[in-house]
Amino acid sequence: MMRSLYSGVSGLRNHQTRMDVIANNIANVNTVGYKSSRAVFQDVFSQTSRSAGAPGAQYGGTNPMQIGLGVKTAAIDVLHTQSAFQRTDNPLDLAIQGDGFFVIKSGANELYTRAGNFYLDNAGNLVTSDGSYVQGVQVCTLGSTGGTTSLNTAPTGVISYAVTNLNLSNFRGISIDSNGAVWGLDHSDNKVQIATLAIGTFVNPSGLEKLGSSTYDVTPNSGAVTYNVARTGAAGSVEAGGVEMSNVDLSAEFTDMIVTQRGFQANSRIITTTDTLLEELINLKR
């Protein structure tokens, strides 16, 4: 009977973990670029009362007799599925249609995000809402006479030289196309490419670690980042004038909440029922 008691306890603990995951998903239903998570259960060690037996001349084979000892949380997966596009008509609001992440620099750390609500700071740098620098390749800048100075050939495909902060100062009419190319007008009203956004891709994006503020960091199981130009290789396209919404499905989350609640209740009944059996055992002496 003690086995059933501890199995019930393990059920309570792990259903509470699942409820924590669901609660966080629902809390982030309107978070830009948020990717929902799910808790996956698996059984734990089973105690073998009798091993399997092979068939013989006089008797047939027998199956093993095992008693399970509870449940554990096998994984908490991040579901990197595409979510809806929310139009804002802000030219610096961006979303990735397909795979990949925007590359940002936060202090000395390079991080990755799907939240494309970007801004210009007072120095003309393209930044996130918390001031992290958006990374890419600077193609040109304005010279001292007001004309453009070329810095790099505009990259195509995989970006092999280092990515850097993007500065759009003194350009007007900023726009960003589906390839992640940043365009603007110089002082002579010539339309020039200022920069190219870097789109980071990974062999296993589910292996990335969430760090908060809608950012991710590499782990040994995510693989190293590959910098791509949008719409090349594994990278998706860039959609300007809007952001990617959260991929949380409220109907699925509420259904999972009900199932989790019932699972929690059922496991609590195991504990109370086992307690009743133990009470009856103690009362045998009377």
Image (spheres, rainbow, N blue to C red):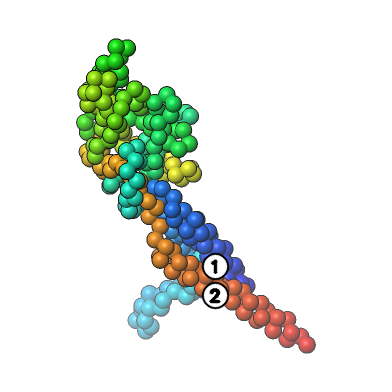
- 69 left or right, relative to 227: right
| Quarter of the picture holding the N terminus | bottom right
Where does the image place residue 172, in percent across and percent down from the top left?
Answer: 30, 27
> Callout 1 environment at 10 Å: few (<14), some (14 to 19), or many (20+)?
many
- 248 left or right, relative to 20: left
Q: Assign a secondary structure to mark 2.
A: helix
When the figure is inspected, residue 147 is found, relative to residue 29, above or below; the finding is above
Compute the Cα span from label 1 to label 2: 9 Å
Where does the image place residue 97, in percent across and percent down from the top left?
Answer: 28, 46
Q: Residue at x 42, y 55 (%)?
A: 36
Q: Amino acid at mark 1?
A: Gly
Q: Amino acid at mark 2?
A: Ala
Q: Nearer the viewer, residue 47 or 18?
A: 18
Q: Which residue is mark 1?
A: 11
Quarter where residue 201 is shown: top left
When the figure is inspected, residue 84 is found, relative to residue 262, above or below; the finding is above
Q: Assign a secondary structure to mark 1.
A: helix
Check the image and name the residue furthest to the right.
286
Q: Which residue is mark 2?
A: 266
Q: Residue at x 26, y 30 (%)?
A: 183
- 52 left or right, relative to 68: left
Q: Nearer the viewer, residue 275 or 262?
A: 262
- Tag nearer the camera, 1 or 2: 2
Q: Nearer the viewer, residue 76 or 31?
A: 31
> Tag 2 or tag 1, which sits nearer the N-term?
1
- 18 left or right, relative to 284: left
Q: Are marks 1 and 2 in contact (CB under 8 Å)?
A: yes
Note whether residue 45 is visible: no
Q: Nearer the viewer, residue 251 or 47?
A: 251
Where does the image place residue 107, in percent across and percent down from the top left?
Answer: 48, 29
